[in-house]
Amino acid sequence: MKPNSTELTILKLLWQSQPRTGKGIHDALSKRFGWGYSSTRKTLERMSAKGLLSEGMQGNKKIYSAKLEKMPTLALLAQDFAKQIMELDSPLPVAMFADSKIMSSEELAELELLLSSPSNKDNHKGEAN
């Protein structure tokens, strides 16, 4: 399952630092989405039910972590964009992502491997089932 744009925003936040409390996630994203806390909580519950997040407890607070791995998920989304939007059969050049603010040079190297790997086209490690 590919995350939608809202889910991807939450995953990107968690990939930066996890686990996070529901309130911590809400505080970081409330201005962007204009949501009340109940909307954030419902989205987190829905993402957990879909297998995108894991839930735990820290004291009396519910905490969330990403279940999807960052680089396989981003590779899947990049491949999907290349195929569905651009109608390309070949992998996207990793140079496109060189100035990304969310990837380190090590992650860029991992992305290059994932995008060029024929097995990744059929076996999406970052995809939750």
Image (tube, helix red, strand yellow):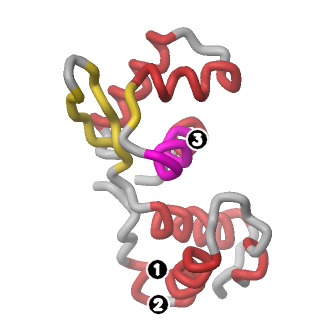
Q: Residues within 10 Å of mark 1 (few under 14, many from 20)?
A: some
Real-space Cα distance between discs 3 and 1? 24 Å
* Disc 2 versus disc 3: nearer the observer: 3
- Residue at coordinates 64% horizontally, 78% vertically from top-left? 105
User: Does residue 10 belong to the magenta stretch?
Assistant: yes
Q: Percent x, y for residue 129? A: 28, 55
Hey, what amino acid is under mark 3?
Thr
Quarter of the view holding residue 116: bottom right
Real-space Cα distance between discs 2 and 3? 28 Å
- Which disc, if any, is residue 9? 3
Residue toward you, 123 or 27: 27
> Which residue was labeled with disc 1?
121
Per the picture, the main secondary structure of the magenta-coloured stretch is helix
- Looking at the image, tell me whether mark 2 or mark 3 is earlier in sequence order: 3
User: Does residue 101 belong to the magenta stretch?
Assistant: no
- Residue at coordinates 39% horizontally, 71% vertically from top-left? 124
Q: Percent x, y for residue 80? A: 59, 66
Real-space Cα distance between discs 1 and 2? 6 Å
> Which residue was labeled with disc 2?
118
Q: Percent x, y for residue 67? A: 33, 51
- Residue at coordinates 55% horizontally, 64% vertically from top-left? 74
> Which span of residues is magenta-colored?
9-17
